[in-house]
Amino acid sequence: MYPKALACGTDIVCVELEDGIAPKDKAAARAHALKLFETPQANDGVERIVRINSMRERFGIEDVQAILATDTPPPALMMPKVRTPDEVQLLDALLTEAGHTTRLHVIIETNAGLEAAYDIAHCSPRIDAMFFGGVDMAAELRCQNAWEPMLYARSKVVHAAASAGLDVIDVPFLDLEDPDGMRTAAEKARDLGFAGKGSVHPKQIAALNDVITPSAEQITRARRIIAEFEAADTGLDVIDGKLIEKPVLRDMHRIVSIADRIGE
């Protein structure tokens, strides 16, 4: 499944060790996952991540011990059910001691984690992204796992990630037979500030990429606005009848940076 996932058009492939693995299979899954990284990975632009178990559980401790012991650690680890900054700081310190450059991705999916999201986002320079774990979060909040009941929690995670300059990724859409519902959820997440949305099946990738990636028209407009604003050499300008100031320009630069990354 790993090579197929790498070729399906996604930006990140996450190898699962947590909830998707039964307790009896944890040790075998851990060994197989780490073996994937014993050989050099292709420079294909796809981020490789391993989702470990919670640092507050035995399986998570065993995952970390195995990662510290290898000379070929995964490029990044996804930390589930993070509650406080000290969990991230501890793993950061252990990786540093082992000489590993492994990056971190943090899932906010508990009440405690939601309360501490801002501090978690700022607690380690290893963090590249925050993920919103909607399924666990809904259970924690005792609310329906739907857009409106979860809007506050989503917004708080977006705020925390943006304050630290981190990417923020929304929870996967779990109904594989409702592509229209997934597209709507992805559009809402994008408009709220999410940089991407998780996927549980390759058939979701094309639609998610279409929603999240700026269109050709948006990219052309962003480049033109940046050029016209710089040519005006003022603190603000009127372009296409709209007032353009530095905050708007920041969004235009973000669109162009995405376009440059994907070669548009």
Image (spheres, rainbow, N blue to C red):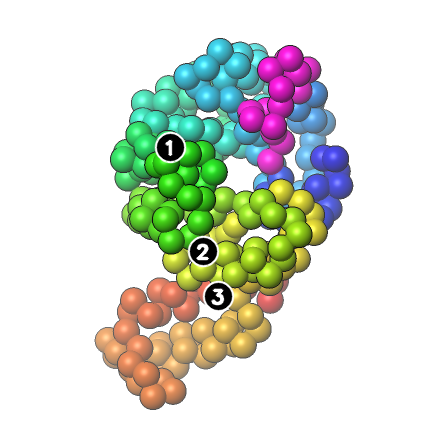
Few, some or many C-alpha atoms within 10 Å of disc 1 (few <14, some 14-19, many ≥20)?
few
Specify whether residue 167 is painted magenta: no
- Residue 224 lies, with reference to residue 63, above or below; the image says below
Per the image, label 1 sits on a secondary structure element best described as helix
Few, some or many C-alpha atoms within 10 Å of disc 3 (few <14, some 14-19, many ≥20)?
many
Q: Position of residue 42 (x, y in %)?
A: 70, 39
Q: Are marks 2 and 1 in contact (CB under 8 Å)?
A: no
Q: Position of residue 164 (x, y in %)?
A: 32, 44
Specify whether residue 22 is painted magenta: yes
Q: How many tags in the picture? A: 3
Q: Which mark is residue 189?
A: 2
Q: Residue at x 36, y 85 (%)?
A: 239
- Work out whether mark 2 precedes mark 1 in sequence or the reverse, and give the earlier one: 1
Mark 3 — residue?
Answer: 256
Q: Position of residue 98 (x, y in %)?
A: 48, 16
In depth, the one of 145 and 73 nearer the eye is 145
- Mark nearest the camera among 2 and 3 is 2
Q: Amino acid at mark 3?
A: Val
Q: Amino acid at mark 1?
A: Glu
Q: Position of residue 153 (x, y in %)?
A: 34, 44
Tell me which segment is drawn in magenta.
14-31
Mark 1 — residue?
Answer: 140
- Residue 175 lies, with reference to residue 103, above or below; the image says below
Q: Looking at this view, name the residue that lies furthest to the bottom.
A: 241
Per the image, label 2 sits on a secondary structure element best described as helix
Which quarter of the figure is the N terminus placed in? top right
Marks 3 and 1, how far apart in space?
38 Å
Q: Amino acid at mark 2?
A: Ala
Q: Residue at x 36, y 49 (%)?
A: 149
Q: Residue at x 38, y 41 (%)?
A: 143
